[in-house]
Amino acid sequence: MKKDAFYFPHDSNAKDDPKCVLLIDQLGCEGYGIYWILIEILREQPEYSYPIALLPSLAKRYGTSFEKIKAVVCNYGLFIVKDDIIFFSESLIRRMKPLEDKRLKNSLAGKESAKRRALKRNEHSTNAQHLFNERSTDVQHTFNIKEKRKEENINNNIGESTDSPTALSFENIWSLYGKKGNKKTSERKWGKLSITAKEKALAYIPAYVEATPDKQYRKNFETFLNQECWNDELPSNDPINKTEHETKYRFID
């Protein structure tokens, strides 16, 4: 017997059923054998029914007559004929019901299991996407912070644009200092100062310019920057000291 062979419950005393007793009495064991062949054929059908039109083919296949097969189907109440098109066995359908119920239960359970697996996959996919979005946001936030710091460092190292209107712009400082020295060199050196150094210089320069109204006593701006003169004490604005200074240099000359 093949592993995938179908089966059905078979009453051990089926031969003693009044319908079968009459069948055997009139058609003998051949008629009883035809009955069980038909039951087995019906068992193999998806809807447990079979076309009346194919009875001649069955008779030829199993070595009997069409008249005998038709008699078994129609004359003993063993089968139900519907619209002279198909026939089926109520007894077989009743015996197959537990199997059909089991199949339906397994099918529903399989669909429910598949639904739960799909929901779980979707949940995992949603969670993974959410985690990915969070990490992407964190990465973007970190990138933005780094870019901002990088930009700040560039501004600190390179300095502000000469067109910048802010107090720490080179043009403002150059004008405030009195435009003394080499502008190009001074601008380059100013751009390299940190914000802190620029702020100290900005606070110091007005007082330094006031203390050295005569530009000949004021250091060139690039020298002022190189020496970080904003850390020094302000020079004296005493005319006597200036005269002595001038006399000293004339004496040396």
Image (spheres, rainbow, N blue to C red):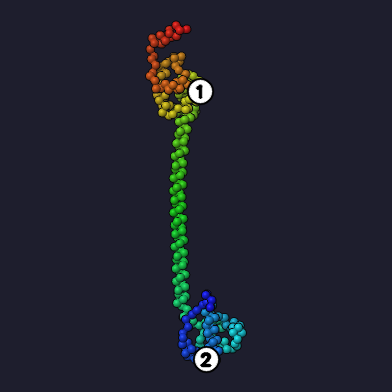
* Residue at (44% x, 14% y) in the render: 217
Q: Is residue 182 above or below residue 37?
A: above
Residue 28 image point, x, y percent: 54, 91
Q: Is residue 246 above or below residue 193?
A: above
Label 2's element?
A: helix
Q: Quadrant of residue 238?
A: top left
* Residue at (46% x, 36% y) in the render: 150
- Answer left or right for 139 relative to 51: left
Give the mark nearer the N terminus: 1 vs 2.
2
Residue 182 image point, x, y percent: 50, 20
Q: Is residue 128 above or below residue 217?
A: below
* Residue at (43% x, 8% y) in the render: 248
Query: Marks 1 and 2, Cα distance to the nearest angstrom?
Result: 127 Å
Residue lying at the far bottom of the rendered structure: 25
Label 2 crowd bin: few (<14), some (14–19), many (20+), radius 10 Å:
some
Residue 120 image point, x, y percent: 44, 59
Label 1's element?
A: helix
Q: Quadrant of residue 219?
A: top left
Question: Which amino acid type is shown beneath numbered disc 2?
Answer: Ile
* Residue at (44% x, 39% y) in the render: 145
Residue lying at the far top of the rendered structure: 251
Question: Which amino acid type is shown beneath numbered disc 1?
Answer: Thr
Q: Which mark is residue 24?
A: 2
Q: Nearer the viewer, residue 4 or 145?
A: 4
Q: Which mark is residue 185?
A: 1
Q: Are marks 1 and 2 in contact (CB under 8 Å)?
A: no
Label 1 crowd bin: few (<14), some (14–19), many (20+), radius 10 Å:
few
Q: Which mark is residue 153?
A: none
Q: Is residue 83 visible?
A: no
